[in-house]
Amino acid sequence: MNRRQFIRAAAAAVLAAPMINIGRVRLSAQPQTSYPTRVVDLVRESLVIDMLHQIEYRIDQQAVLRRWLTDPTAFGDNDFEQYRRSGITVIALGRGSGPYENGLRHVAEFNGFIAAHPEYFVRIDDPSDFAKAKREGKLGILISFQDSQHFRSVDDVDVFHGLGQRDSQLTYNGANRLGSGAFEPPTAGLTDFGAQVVERMNRVGMAVDLAHAGDRTMLDAFRLTRKPAIISHGNCRALHPGYPRCVTDEAIRALAATGGVIGINFISFMVKATEPTTVDDVIDHIDHVRDLVGLEHVGIGSDFGLESNDHMPDHEALERFLRSADARYRVHAREAVQDLDHPLRFFTLTDALLRRGYTPAQVKLILGENFRRVLTAIAAGV
């Protein structure tokens, strides 16, 4: 059982709602955390894109969260308020597709969910929808998959684009018809079918996503693509040597050469080999990409829902969940970076970035403007 298959529940039922109070944000669900006014203001005025955010995430809340997708009345004002207060503007769903029929069902569920709640959601179909979501105070949802098994033929790329999909990882950790994932031999690359799919994704304006791909598959795709590519969620192997889910400097340079962006994730065991992990360890990865290829090539893909599974009250269940993961993940005692496991993590990140010396304009690039730029270029045919 891989990590994606085991994780299926998300975080609108957070332990308690955060409050905004006189220019400071307080989390009542945790030891009190407050933020300077400049941090609150900066997040609130920024376009914040979480390029891997799974609404169905918290494994102890599966029944509640599945009901959101099957009962139009199950999601209400209190649920949406958790997202509004988080500061997040747009989420990319990043669910595993599975076979064609499963992919259709996933798209249908989320299209129905979005259509049932026009007061809360905007489906991200084209670049103008980023500004629309921000302007109207709604949550933008970008339909994406964490693999491309649902593409039976290159024509299925057109089918799913027509249904709203705007991003697709070519592989998960294993091999499929398109190429090899991060847990396959590093010399295995993109297949002929994978090359055809990349070409068709370029043509229709769907993001070619190399998160979870093997080293050679990444390089093959970056060489082949005619548009910017992305890595929705992945960290730097230079800071986590030998870790297969992290990205080599060679691949980061090749990604940047396409004009693309890598989203740094907040999973503890993907940040560094040993615990504890902190927000400053995450910023080390941002610094590395900045120094290697430029700040315009880094964004965020947190890789969970509003909060991580560390918030499960049943600690034994959390331990079982972590032990069940593929051994190659080398899991920690925690799932997520401790500072960044909660709904207001983008405020925590912003505060730390400013303290590290990043300017407000640079923080905005990291929070979402870099991903807006690259997704706009992909859609526009640049």
Image (cartoon, rainbow, N blue to C red):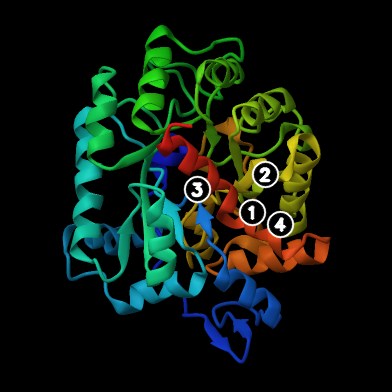
Upstream in sequence: badge 1 or badge 2 = 2
Question: Circle 3 — which element?
Answer: loop
Question: Circle 4 — which element?
Answer: helix
CA separation in Å, label 3 and label 4: 18 Å
Q: Which mark is residue 365?
A: 1
94 relative to 9, above or below: above
- The residue at the point 72 percent across, 32 percent down is 237
- Foreground residue, 101 or 44? 44
Please identify the quadrant where the N terminus is shown.
Answer: top left
357 relative to 197, above or below: below
- The residue at the point 25 percent across, 51 percent down is 110
Upstream in sequence: badge 3 or badge 2 = 3
Residue 301 locus on image (x, y percent): 55, 48
Would you name the residue on which mark 2 appears? Answer: 296
CA separation in Å, label 1 and label 4: 5 Å
- The residue at the point 56 percent across, 41 percent down is 233
CA separation in Å, label 1 and label 3: 13 Å
- Foreground residue, 356 or 171? 356
209 relative to 375, above or below: above
Upstream in sequence: badge 4 or badge 2 = 2
CA separation in Å, label 1 and label 2: 7 Å
Residue 341 locus on image (x, y percent): 58, 62
Label 1 with label 2: CB-CB less than 8 Å:
yes
Q: Which mark is residue 264?
A: none
Would you name the residue on which mark 4 appears? Answer: 362
Judge from the rendering whether residue 57 lies leftward or rightward of residue 182; answer left or right. left
Question: Circle 1 — which element?
Answer: helix
Tag nearer the camera, 1 or 3: 1
- Foreground residue, 9 or 155? 155
How packed mark 1 is, by other alpha carbons closer than 10 Å (few <14, some 14-19, many 20 or more), is many
